[in-house]
Image (tube, helix red, strand yellow):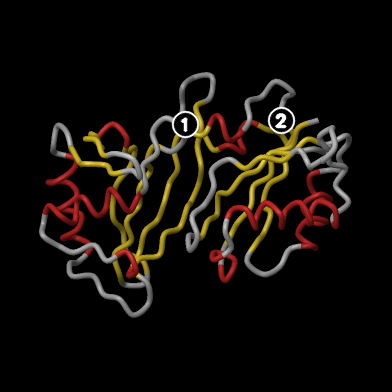
Amino acid sequence: MRIRIKFRKYGPMKFIGHLDMMRYFQKAMRRADIDICYSEGYSPHQIMSFAAPLGVGITSDGEYLDIEVHSSMSTKEALQRINDTMVYGVEVTEYVELEQNAKKAMTMVASAEYDVFYKEGYESPKTVDEWASIIEDNFWKKEEFIITKKTKKSEREVDLKPLVEKFSVLEKDGRPCFNLQVSTGSVNNIKPELVLESVFKTVDVEFAKEAFQIHRVEVFAYDNSENLVPLGAFGKEIQ
């Protein structure tokens, strides 16, 4: 029986790295008495995989992990039991059963939505309306938006236009908040701050990464109709 779990990560837990989060959830499954399956062999481990690792310092409302269980309690009871083991900064919000032949979350991730906004104490050099015009004129109205993407081993030119589903700006606590949905996964993986930094450069504004808080809103995959839907939509609640 396969289960997909969705959780939030916020507050001080945003500084906990991916490997420590994996260990944290392994302990949480034991404490919550989840009937999780273990691998075979000399060093058995819980059958658990995360959809898309979150960078240190990033908060999220849309993190996912898949587990295999021998049996399961109801969604309502599982949520209560798991959350009773959680510390401040992590909250499980969904617990759904997947079809047995469903793809693993980590292999089907296609895009992710983010909010990127100024932290307390930092001010934007431009207003919300000014940023909206800049995004429209310097990104959406362009036929292509070529950047040089650098990796540890090389660098290559990439057109960001087909890799960005959404890019807009709204107001949050009196300051601009950039909303982006970008390609995510093993094939094309674009960080929202890369898109922002590239647009900032077009108007000679410095992108100071330390001034921004990045918040992942949701993670998406393609359904059978080739529509992007949240990863949780592939499962159903257990009654």
Q: In this view of the protein, which residue sits in the foreground, 3 or 47?
A: 47
Please state, as top left, top right, bottom left or bottom right, where the N terminus lies in the image: top right
Please state, as top left, top right, bottom left or bottom right, where the C terminus lies in the image: top right
Residue matched to label 1: 228
Q: Does 169 appear above or below 110?
A: below
* Distance in Å between CA atoms under marks 2 and 1: 18 Å
Q: Does 121 appear above or below 114?
A: below
Q: Is residue 221 left or right of residue 23?
A: left
Q: In this view of the protein, which residue sits in the foreground, 129 or 122?
A: 122
Q: Residue at x 15, y 53 (%)?
A: 133
- Where residue 83 sits, quadrant-wise, is bottom right
Residue matched to label 2: 98
Q: Residue at x 60, y 56 (%)?
A: 8
In percent of width and height, residue 198 lies at 21, 50
Q: Residues within 10 Å of mark 1 (few under 14, many from 20)?
A: some
Q: Does 166 appear above or below 89?
A: above
* Marked residue nearer the N-terminal end (2 or 1): 2
- Where residue 49 sits, quadrant-wise, is top right
Q: Residue at x 76, y 51 (%)?
A: 26
Q: Callout 1, which amino acid?
A: Leu
In percent of width and height, residue 179 lies at 35, 52
Q: Residue at x 56, y 70 (%)?
A: 11
In percent of width and height, residue 19 lies at 62, 53
Please give the label number shown on residue 148: none
Q: Secondary structure at mark 2?
A: strand
